[in-house]
Amino acid sequence: MRRKFKVAVLGATGMVGVRFISLLVGHPWFKLVAAAASERSKGQRLREAVRWLPPQGLPEEILEFEVKSLSPKELEAADVVFSALPSDVAGRVEEEFARAGFAVFSNASSHRMDKDVPVLNPEVNADHAFLVEEQRKRRRWSGFIVTNPNCTAAVLTLSLKPILDGFGIRRVLVSTMQALSGAGYPGVPSLDIVDNIIPFIKGEEEKVERETLKMMGSPSKPASFKISASCHRVSTIDGHLEAVFVELGRKAEPSEVAEAMEVFQGEPQKLGLPTAPKPPIVVKGENDRPQPRLDRMAGGGMAVVVGRMRKDPGLNGVKYVVLGHNTIRGAAGCSILNAELLAAKRLIS
């Protein structure tokens, strides 16, 4: 890169916002210059406004940042903004920033299904990045919005990409066991989740189904295979575990599918992007892997881990388990990788 881009985080005091900040500290391409949040946090030091910190903490100089308001004028020192805003406010605020000329990389669902807004999981659909040019032209914006997918869909689609490319897909069934951090901070009340599993996450199944098809199709047409999701909250802190059942487009042995995953490289790996995990998919041979406590930080939390690859007689295909870190690969890390991809393609100026 010829220069470092100056970046800010919107919704910086929430769990995903703090995760953005922790991943941006020391980034070779991006320099964090500001943190912004709602009016109730405006004017506070970040250390006063934040209730959750990653295990490694944050540098003192970052904790001394004064929290800014969600205004393009307040953040005019930045070129790029990463949005960890809740969906009920993200739509309007992100549009204001894009209209004002910022490159907006959003973790919110507000714009994911807009036809001219790419939902990017870079190893899966890097070719969708150029939708931002159509978006700028259509909306007459100098900036743009790019979204990353729902955390569950991010993990799922990365595991499905080499299958789609090598064997084709007719049908996908997925049953998820989703971590508490996916509900944000403070998350699910302890008396609801301790000694319990909650077999419902509002809107989650619909997001997984819609977003998977949008990402795995062409920029103008969703994929045509059938997908059905069942989503459940479990008492794990980080790491979404998903049981996946795939009807293949052509007959293949589980060992062939596993090998295709092991050798898979997406565009981020070919471009050598800083946040790109090498490899993006880790395949485990043990019968009892992957496990969240052991495997969620594979590739710095950016890789997904696949295990228990075997035949599925019900669908005449394969079935496996995939694990991914929901607040890194499934949220902030994916969004930062998106920004790296667009910077490498010179779509950020």
Image (spheres, grey):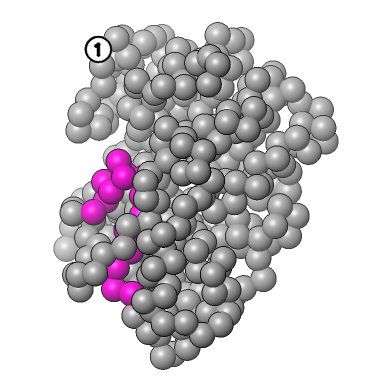
- State whether residue 197 appears in this view: no
In the image, taking residue 287 as reference, residue 119 lies left or right, namely right
Residue 303 magenta-highlighted? yes
| Closer to the camera in the image, 178 or 132 | 132
In the image, taking residue 97 as reference, residue 248 lies left or right, namely left
Q: Residue at x 24, y 12 (%)?
A: 60
Relative vertical location of residue 277 with respect to residue 193 in this rendering, above or below: above
Magenta extent: 295-309
| Closer to the camera in the image, 89 or 284 | 284
Q: Residue at x 38, y 44 (%)?
A: 277
Q: How many other residues sit within 10 Å of disc 1, few (<14), some (14-19) or many (≥20)?
A: few
Which residue in the protein does label 1 denote? 60
Relative vertical location of residue 138 with respect to residue 24 in this rendering, above or below: below
Query: x, y percentage for residue 109?
Result: 56, 45
In the image, taking residue 92 as reference, residue 274 lies left or right, namely left
Query: x, y percentage for residue 124?
Result: 54, 53
